[in-house]
Image (cartoon, rainbow, N blue to C red):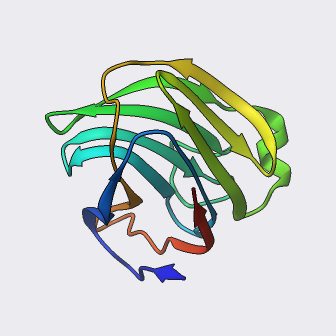
Amino acid sequence: MAKSKGIAGNSIFASSEEYRDVTFSAVASTTNREASLAFRMQDADNGYIVIFGPPRTPCPWNPNGLILLVKRISGSDTTILTCQKRKLAIIGQSAKITVVARGPLIEVHLNGVKILQANDETFASGYIGFRIDGWEDFPCDATFSHESFH
């Protein structure tokens, strides 16, 4: 289990190996901000991130929960797709997040249900891992368990 408590700032904990086609999953949990999976990362400033922001956290910009697929280039994040539906409100503070990356196809699954699908060829391979992101007034206590990849 990877765990962070009260972290402020943006940190990526990444694998030591690069992966091209990969299925990467973890049970992600947070009570105060977000718990995010990173994949096809070139370095901390370039790659893809799936942001899991569960509902009922104290972040005022996220009252209902959301899942974002983000492309990070030179440290700047661009949202590719967003899932912000009412059904996120029933999942509580943790969920199994799975990323499937095969060639340009990227799928994001929430508790076994595909919720996002995109095609993007920017990054064909890279490192996998976890992102912790928080600010002083909105710290991050993300935890990850049951991690798997193949």
Q: Tell me: residue 146, above or below residue 19.
A: below
Q: In front here: 111 or 134? A: 111
Q: Residue at x 39, y 64 (%)?
A: 138
Q: In front here: 18 or 27? A: 18
Residue 50 lies left or right of residue 87; in this view the side is left
Q: Tell me: residue 120, above or below residue 70.
A: above
Q: In front here: 107 or 149? A: 149
Residue 64 lies left or right of residue 81; in this view the side is right
Q: Residue at x 58, y 27 (%)?
A: 82
Q: Residue at x 77, y 61 (%)?
A: 92
Q: Report x, y in % for residue 41.
A: 29, 46
Q: Residue at x 48, y 25 (%)?
A: 103
Q: Report x, y in % for residue 127.
A: 32, 53
Residue 92 lies left or right of residue 101; in this view the side is right
Q: Report x, y in % for residue 150.
A: 57, 56
The mark tally for this picture is 0
Point out the residue furthest to the left here. 74
Q: Quadrant of residue 120?
A: top left
Q: Report x, y in % for residue 1.
A: 54, 82
Residue 117 lies left or right of residue 142; in this view the side is right
